Image (spheres, rainbow, N blue to C red):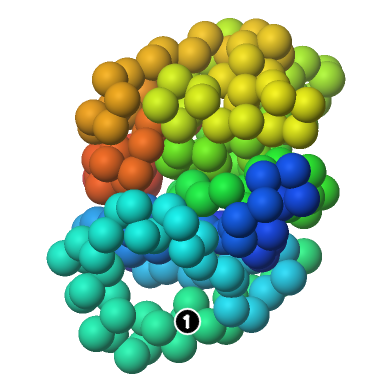
């Protein structure tokens, strides 16, 4: 069987003007996915809007602590080198991959929510019903994704976001509210508890504790799509 190829997309945004503290991607969510997906036998590639080394969200990383997956990742020089040299998103082609994963972190709100290459990438995956996973704030990357007829991608789809949508965006709106306005059915989970929602080929996890389970669900869908 062909080895599944999965793309992990990380934010390049290191600061949000409306929040103040430094931003970035949440290391614990990324390393949870990296561990699960590599253990499942997938080949991984990493990308970000600007390419190169993406910024780690220092606040989110401190709150999440150092998991076994994070320690394992940091001990792997090849993995660290890959993270330090992510592909620019404008050089990535959806047809080269079988699955897509977006870790959370506040930086997602600053670039991936509006990045045209990210939007086109997700739309291409959606058009072929390829498995996609998003954790915590990462569903912000779905806000501007549309179906070919212009319908919001999230319309009619069940999903979850950071603790039921508590992430504030400019103007004081919450991510869950904006997604619901587009027709998404937001399924809240208990604060801090593992919570994953699967709707077709879309997998969403509600918080950092859900990253591992989100990646496992994604790996299962990728293998199922590959067939026997």
Q: Is residue 79 visible?
A: yes
Q: Quadrant of residue 9?
A: bottom right
Q: Which residue, as the protein is rendered here, is positioned at the far left?
A: 68
Q: On screen, 11 above or below 143? A: below
Residue in the image at 27% along x and 59% along y: 65
Q: Position of residue 132 (x, y in %)?
A: 48, 40
Examine the image and state in which quarter residue 35 appears.
bottom left
Name of the residue lying farthest toward the front: 20
Whether residue 225 appears in this view of the structure is no
Q: Position of residue 138 (x, y in %)?
A: 54, 41
Task: Give the camera-side residue of 203 and 24.
Answer: 24
69 sits to left or right of 81? left
Q: Position of residue 183 (x, y in %)?
A: 65, 9
**Which residue is painted at 21% across and 62% down in the image?**
67
In front of the other: 179 or 35 = 179
Residue that appears at 77% across and 50% down: 17
Q: Which residue is mark 1?
A: 82
Looking at this view, is 158 or 148 the one in front? 158
14 vs 103, left or right, is right
Quarter of the image where the N terminus is located: bottom left
Q: Secondary structure at mark 1?
A: helix
* Numbered disc total: 1
Q: Is residue 169 above or below residue 19?
A: above
**Quadrant holding the C terminus:** top left
Vertical position of residue 141 compared to residue 162: above or below: below
Q: Quadrant of residue 11?
A: bottom right
Q: Could you say where residue 147 lies in the image, as x and y percent from the top left? A: 74, 24
Q: Classify 51 as above or below 213.
A: below
Q: Residue at x 24, y 85 (%)?
A: 75
Circle 1 packing at 10 Å, graded few (<14), some (14-19), many (20+), is some
- Residue 113 horizontal side relative to residue 205, left or right: right
């Amino acid at each position: 069987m062909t080895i599944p190829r999965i793309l992990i997309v990380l934010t390049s945004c290191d600061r949000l003007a409306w929040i103040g503290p430094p931003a970035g991607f949440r290391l614990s969510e990324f390393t949870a996915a990296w561990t699960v997906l590599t253990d499942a036998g997938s080949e991984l590639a990493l990308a970000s809007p600007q390419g190169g080394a993406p910024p780690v969200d220092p606040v989110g990383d401190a709150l999440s602590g150092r998991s076994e997956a994070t320690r394992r990742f940091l001990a792997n020089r090849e993995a660290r080198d890959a993270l330090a040299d992510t592909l620019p998103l404008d050089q990535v082609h959806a047809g080269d991959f079988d699955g897509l994963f977006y870790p959370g972190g506040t930086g997602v709100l600053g670039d991936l929510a509006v990045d045209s290459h990210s939007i086109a990438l997700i739309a291409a995956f959606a058009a072929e019903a390829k498995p996609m996973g998003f954790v915590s704030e990462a569903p912000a990357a779905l806000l501007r994704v549309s179906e070919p007829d212009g319908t919001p991608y999230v319309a009619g789809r069940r999903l979850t976001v950071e603790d039921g949508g508590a992430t504030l965006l400019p103007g004081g709106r919450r991510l869950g509210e904006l997604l619901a306005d587009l027709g998404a059915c937001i399924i809240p989970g208990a604060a801090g508890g593992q919570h994953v929602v699967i709707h077709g080929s879309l997998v969403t996890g509600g918080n950092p504790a859900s990253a591992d389970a989100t990646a496992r669900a994604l790996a299962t869908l990728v293998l199922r799509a590959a067939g026997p």
